[in-house]
Amino acid sequence: MEKPRFLTHSHLSRVALWLTLFGYPTKVFPRLTKKEISLCAGGKCKVLTTSRGLEKTLQNLKVEYLILPNWEDWKTQLCMVLRHFKLEPQLRLNYCPLCLGKLKPINPQEVKDKIPEGALRCGKNFKICPSCGKVYWEGGHKRLMEKTLKELSQRCGEVFREFSFKE
């Protein structure tokens, strides 16, 4: 079964980033219009919004959606998305957060001119986005992402007592 894809407003960009890091590519638009929403017709993706004003358009286009409260912080909003769509919050790091291209493993020597010398020495699991050419690797930032994931787990547990994460 293919993992869900999402479409959202730019003010939900942190939610979008983390969904993408979890392996659920999320395209961000400054404004959601009928044109953008129609990209999700036929089950191609799901829409995340804070706008009740879009609900009729979403229903008319038969698009699956979730309206999030705009007064909540991004971690709580992300918990709501994870719970509603029954998604696993696991760092998969398999899509480019910039263009949503599917990342491909690459030998660091092939991209040594595109990465800092320290990353070449200490990084591991190098990947490249064939769409935009951006190179990614595991380094110190992964520890920060794992720390944020633990904070997210705690927040989701507080928001939804029965909500649990698989470690």
Image (spheres, rainbow, N blue to C red):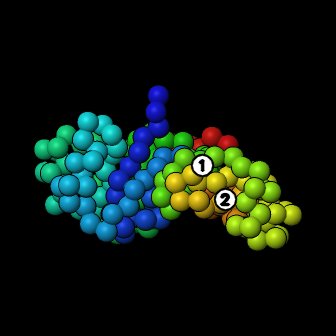
Taking depth in this image into account, of 149 and 132 the one nearest to the observer is 132
Is residue 117 visible in the rendered structure shown here? yes
Q: Tell me how far mark 1 sits from mark 2, CA to CA.
A: 9 Å
Give the x, y percent position of residue 2.
Answer: 46, 33
Look at label 2 and name its amino acid: Tyr
Q: Are marks 1 and 2 in contact (CB under 8 Å)?
A: yes
Above or below: residue 48 compared with residue 30: above
Above or below: residue 70 compared with residue 159: below
Is residue 159 visible in the rendered structure shown here? no
Give the x, y percent position of residue 154.
Answer: 59, 56
Q: SS at mark 1? A: loop
Look at label 1 and name its amino acid: Leu
Check disc 1 and report the residue beneath it. Answer: 103
Residue at (63%, 40%) from the top-left corner?
Answer: 166
Check disc 2 and report the residue beneath it. Answer: 136
Taking depth in this image into account, of 165 and 23 the one nearest to the observer is 23
